[in-house]
């Protein structure tokens, strides 16, 4: 029996009431359902249950009028004495009340009090107390109920995110019914873990968070976050398991091509290059498919590692392809590889046309061509490989899991090596790259001078430009980066073009411009001019981020550095410092930086450790920007925030591995409960692909 079948029979049935639409709840019509869906992110009872409160109002304080404190949220049992109507339109209505210990006033602005507040009425009221002179007042009480129904008042009231037209009372009533529909599901967590953390069961945790009778609710909240993280990590582990089971081929080589390459290269590989290569070789030699991420800062020497890996495929008589994200980078890699490789390297990009393209395709199809470099053109239908054993993908941190897997699809058994210059924080590795194994290049080749980073206010722009002028006269090459951040690309562009115009007016045709809105050919030409030294100062939007290699460039100016993420600044900075001479990075910022911004730029000034910067950046930005989305938090998580719950995430990662190790088919009692958990968090896809794969 497969996990999905077992899910159908065992897990789906008790979960059915949770998957029902909220319109099934009393008092929830289509209009209210739509508003609930808007705030909860889905139309089901389960979505409502996962709509977490931001905070809680504690109404349990029940003082008398005499002991009550202004400023306090309190619930009071009172009797109405009289109503004072306002004398002018600007004054409020006042309802004077007593409880025998003193007097207080309920205050209503703009409209008369509810009709129930007649003299003699016995009520329970709840709200925030204020002092007005020596009077105790409660402006706009949150709750007014007859004393006989005092039990209707929540002691602790969750404060949920709302939307226009949706009121707390409506949500409270719907939530109460939703909670009543939560079945008692078997526990999916390890009993030892539950004991150690003192966590309540799933149902109790939902009650504790959504309708608490005690505060704080941290344990229940953490348990629910862990539910989601475990579901995610188990799903990831499934994909990984499937990938590992997929047969690959054992690639072994005689080492002669590699030896010749290292001889041409002339330097000794760094310890972490050797380590990464050993890990890659072990994968290549194993009869299963490689899915490995090679993580290394800009300039850490990933290209050499990639080439040596590719040569192993060639030594085994097979083919290897390296895919770059842009035409410029593809050409650059092609130049580098051709220089180092003892065997020919073919280039295949969109602009290779006609006879050249036909010949390239023939060589790739008949297997005479062993090494190929290109853009995504490499993976088009028309390209038939004789025997593609290894696909190397450079700088593809913006791809999702599915896309990465697709790229390996040119051969059933093709090994995949992804190279990224973005030092991915641990948290993201676990959440977004879980199907991959990781090698890290942690140090730079020896002899590299550290980049000198300085921070300047834009108010001193004149001095900065003077300094740049002196550098240009010395023959140095300079990047000048303008941010691409505002809502309107046109405004950003205008800023870059204005900067280009002023610098050009000052330094003449030594200045060039490259930005994302240009025709690619025109932009490539500008980058090529800069690489060749025809222009010395390149004003650019973040196009240069993608990995242009101009070793002669020694100065990086970043305008409005405060608008970039730390990781992005670090990556930009890595465009210089690739040659032998001293390099500089100038971070220009607006006046009036906040302390946080100042600290962040300071961190960049103090360290070149990309992993440190990445972790810090992730903590600040919650990873949103790294993933190319301007939002905090990671997509796909509702109860957990992987940045905030990093410890839980690591636990879930180990937990999932152990669970699947012991019970790969999830057939045990705990395993079956976990299947239900996966369905609850929509993480069943991993299992379906497991069966398909
Ligand atoms: P990455 O792709 O990781 O940004 P590159 O592969 O482009 O880095 O390498 C950056 C520079 O360092 C290149 O000029 C390369 O030749 C040089 N390099 C790489 N490995 C070594 C090494 N072991 N010793 C000396 N120089 C190296
Ligand atoms: Mg590179």
Image (cartoon, rainbow, N blue to C red):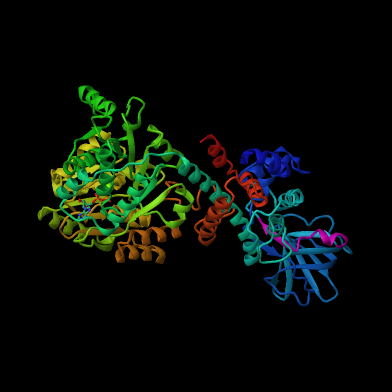
Corner quadrant of residue 22: top right
Please state the extent of the stretch shown in magenta in the rendering.
147-159
In the rendered image of this protein, does residue 105 appear above or below residue 357?
Answer: below
Corner quadrant of residue 596: bottom left
Q: Name the residue at 28% across, 36% down.
A: 518
Q: Position of residue 143 (x, y in %)?
A: 76, 59
Magenta run includes residue 156: yes
Q: Name the residue at 65% across, 61% down.
A: 191
In the rendered image of this protein, does residue 474 appear above or below residue 521?
Answer: below
Between 359 and 481, the residue placed more toward the observer is 359
Between 86 and 25, the residue placed more toward the observer is 25
Q: Position of residue 429 (x, y in %)?
A: 44, 52
In the image, is 584 to the left or to the right of 406? left
Between 50 and 680, the residue placed more toward the observer is 680
- Would residue 402 be seen by someone viewing this image from the given angle? yes
Q: Position of residue 635 (x, y in %)?
A: 51, 47
In the image, is 358 to the left or to the right of 115? left
Between 351 and 680, the residue placed more toward the observer is 680
- Would residue 540 be seen by someone viewing this image from the given angle? no
Q: How many marks?
A: 0
Q: Position of residue 111 (x, y in %)?
A: 74, 54
In the image, is 548 to the left or to the right of 395? left
Corner quadrant of residue 18: top right
Magenta run includes residue 614: no
Quarter of the image containing the N terminus? Answer: top right
């Amino acid at each position: 029996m497969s996990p999905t079948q077992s899910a159908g029979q065992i897990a789906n049935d008790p979960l059915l009431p949770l998957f029902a639409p909220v319109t099934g709840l009393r008092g929830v019509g289509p209009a209210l359902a739509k508003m609930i869906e808007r705030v909860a992110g889905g139309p089901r009872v389960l979505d409502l249950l996962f709509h977490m409160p931001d905070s809680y109002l504690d109404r349990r304080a029940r003082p008398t009028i005499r002991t009550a404190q202004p400023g306090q949220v309190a619930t009071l049992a009172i009797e109405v004495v009289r109503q004072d109507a306002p004398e002018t339109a600007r004054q409020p209505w006042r309802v004077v009340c007593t409880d025998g210990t003193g007097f207080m006033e309920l205050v209503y602005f703009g409209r008369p009090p509810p009709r129930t507040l007649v003299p003699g009425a016995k009520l329970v009221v709840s709200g925030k107390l204020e002092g007005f002179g020596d009077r105790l007042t409660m402006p706009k009480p949150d709750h007014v109920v007859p004393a006989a129904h005092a039990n209707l008042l929540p002691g602790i009231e969750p404060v949920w995110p709302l939307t226009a037209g949706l009121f707390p009372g409506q949500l409270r009533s719907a939530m109460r019914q939703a909670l009543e529909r939560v079945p008692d599901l078997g526990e999916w967590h390890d009993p030892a873990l539950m004991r150690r953390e003192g966590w309540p069961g799933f149902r109790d945790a939902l009650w504790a968070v959504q309708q608490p009778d005690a505060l704080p609710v941290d344990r229940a909240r953490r348990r629910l976050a862990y539910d989601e993280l475990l579901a995610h990590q188990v799903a990831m582990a499934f994909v990984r398991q499937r990938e590992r089971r997929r047969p690959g081929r054992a690639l072994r080589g005689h080492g002669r091509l590699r030896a010749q390459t290292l001889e041409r290269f002339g330097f000794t590989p760094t310890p972490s290059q050797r380590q990464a290569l050993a890990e890659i070789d072990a994968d290549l030699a194993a009869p299963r498919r490689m899915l490995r991420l090679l993580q290394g800062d800009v300039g850490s020497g990933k290209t050499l590692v990639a080439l040596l890996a590719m040569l192993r495929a060639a030594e085994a008589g097979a083919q290897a392809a390296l895919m770059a994200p842009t035409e410029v980078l593809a050409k650059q890699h092609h130049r580098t590889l051709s220089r180092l490789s003892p065997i020919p390297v073919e280039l295949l990009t969109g602009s290779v046309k006609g006879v050249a393209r036909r010949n390239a395709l023939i060589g790739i199809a008949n297997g005479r061509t062993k090494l190929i470099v290109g853009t995504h053109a490499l993976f088009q239908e028309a390209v038939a490989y004789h025997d593609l054993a290894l696909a190397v993908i450079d700088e593809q941190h913006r791809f999702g899991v599915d896309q990465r897997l697709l790229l390996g699809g040119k051969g059933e058994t093709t090994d995949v090596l992804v190279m990224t210059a973005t030092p991915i924080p641990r948290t993201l590795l676990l959440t977004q790259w879980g199907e991959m194994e990781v090698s890290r290049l942690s140090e730079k080749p020896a002899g590299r001078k550290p980049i000198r980073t300085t921070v300047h206010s834009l108010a001193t722009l004149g001095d900065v430009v003077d300094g740049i002028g002196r550098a240009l006269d010395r023959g140095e090459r300079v990047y000048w980066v303008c941010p691409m951040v505002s809502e309107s690309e046109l405004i950003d562009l205008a800023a870059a073009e204005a900067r280009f115009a002023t610098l050009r007016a000052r330094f003449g045709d030594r200045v060039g411009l490259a930005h994302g809105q240009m025709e690619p050919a025109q932009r490539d030409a500008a980058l090529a001019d800069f690489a060749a030294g025809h222009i010395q100062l390149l004003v650019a939007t973040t196009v240069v981020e993608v990995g242009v290699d101009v070793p002669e460039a020694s100065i990086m100016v970043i305008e409005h550095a405060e608008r970039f993420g730390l990781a992005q600044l670090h990556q930009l900075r890595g465009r210089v410092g690739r040659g032998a001479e001293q390099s500089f990075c100038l971070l220009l910022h607006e006046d009036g930086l906040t302390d946080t911004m100042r600290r962040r730029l300071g961190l960049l000034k103090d360290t070149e450790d990309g992993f440190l910067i990445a972790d810090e950046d992730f903590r600040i930005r919650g990873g949103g920007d790294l993933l190319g989305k301007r939002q905090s938090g990671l997509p796909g998580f509702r109860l957990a925030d992987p940045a905030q719950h990093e410890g839980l995430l690591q636990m879930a990662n180990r937990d999932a591995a152990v669970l699947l190790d012991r019970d790969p088919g999830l057939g045990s009692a705990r395993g079956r409960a976990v299947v239900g958990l996966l369905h609850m968090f929509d993480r069943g896809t991993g299992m379906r692909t497991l069966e398909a794969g």
